[in-house]
Structure formats: structure tokens, C-alpha cells
Amino acid sequence: MAEYQTTLPRVGYMSFPFRMGREGANQSMRFDHIREQVEQVIFTSPGERVFRPEFGFGARQHVFEPNAPAVWEIAQTRLYGALSEALSGEVDPKTIRVEIGAKPGNEAAMLVQISYTIAAIAREESHEFEVKNG
């Protein structure tokens, strides 16, 4: 009788930012990989990728915008759209929540809060990123 493996194999994803280790390209596990995808969307400016010019949110360009609720709402909508596309298949798009605003006590920094549910296992994740001026 054949014995069956009772645990799923560990599948790694190429880590971001790309790094080389002794055994080749560094890898990330699934939850880290999804967080790294979120980082890529937030910090990549539209037009930066030659073959995907629409990819990215460009958080650094938004740091210089006026600190007004209407501006943050537009930025939230743009980031939500970029994340929905980039995370399709991994994350339930209906569960993506985006909040953007000035960091309390530091008007020269933007605070981005992201939460989502991983579709296959219904695990909720949330992350916070600070984007500084300069």
C-alpha cells in the first residue's frame, strides 16, 4: 500500500525585491508574497513598467498632493483598482479595503492601510505602509 503525503508541499514564490542567495533566487511563502505584491502596486508608478504601463499606483507622487479628503478619496479609488487587478485570483476583491491619509503629526508622510481576505482560505490580512516625502 502506498503512503500519501499528509501535508501540502511548500511552494515558494520569487521574493520582492528580487534578491539572490546562496541557493539561487530568494523565495517568499504565500502570505509574504501577497504582501510583496501589494508593495509593488503601491510603490510602482504607472508607466514605470514597459510592458504593463498601467500597472501601479505611484504612492510617492501622491505625497506631494494637498492634504484634503477629496484628494485622498481619488487616491483610494485608484489604489483599490490597481490592487484588484494585481491580486486577482489570490484575494477576494470584495474584501479589499484601502485607507489613505496624512500620517498624524507628520504632514510630509502618507499613511496607506490595506486589508483583504485571501480567497482560498478566508484568512484576513492587513498591512500599513508609510510613504515619506523624498
Image (cartoon, rainbow, N blue to C red):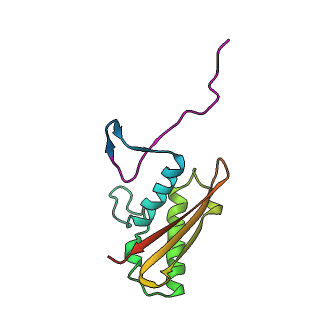
**Residue 31 x %, y %:** 54, 50
Residue at image point 40% right, 52% down: 16
**Residue 43 x %, y %:** 40, 65
**Residue 62 x %, y %:** 41, 77
Tag count in the figure? 0
> Please, is residue 89 above or below residue 9 in the view?
below
> Please, is residue 49 above or below residue 31 in the view?
below
Picture quadrant where residue 96 is located: bottom right
Point out the residue furthest to the front here. 105
Residue at image point 45% right, 61% down: 39
Q: Is residue 43 magenta?
A: no
**Residue 98 x %, y %:** 57, 70
Q: Which residues are magenta?
A: 1-19
Question: In the figure, is residue 68 to the left or right of 117?
Answer: left
Task: Pick whichever, 74 or 9, lies toward us.
Answer: 9
Q: Is residue 3 magenta?
A: yes
Residue at image point 65% right, 14% down: 2
Q: Magenta residues: mostly which secondary structure?
A: loop
Task: Give the quarter of the figure containing the C terminus.
Answer: bottom left
Picture quadrant where residue 59 is located: bottom left
> Please, is residue 26 above or below residue 98 in the view?
above
Task: Give the quarter of the figure containing the N terminus.
Answer: top right
Residue at image point 47% right, 68% down: 129
> Please, is residue 21 above or below residue 116 in the view?
above
Task: Pick whichever, 25 or 79, lies toward us.
Answer: 25
Point out the residue furthest to the top here. 1
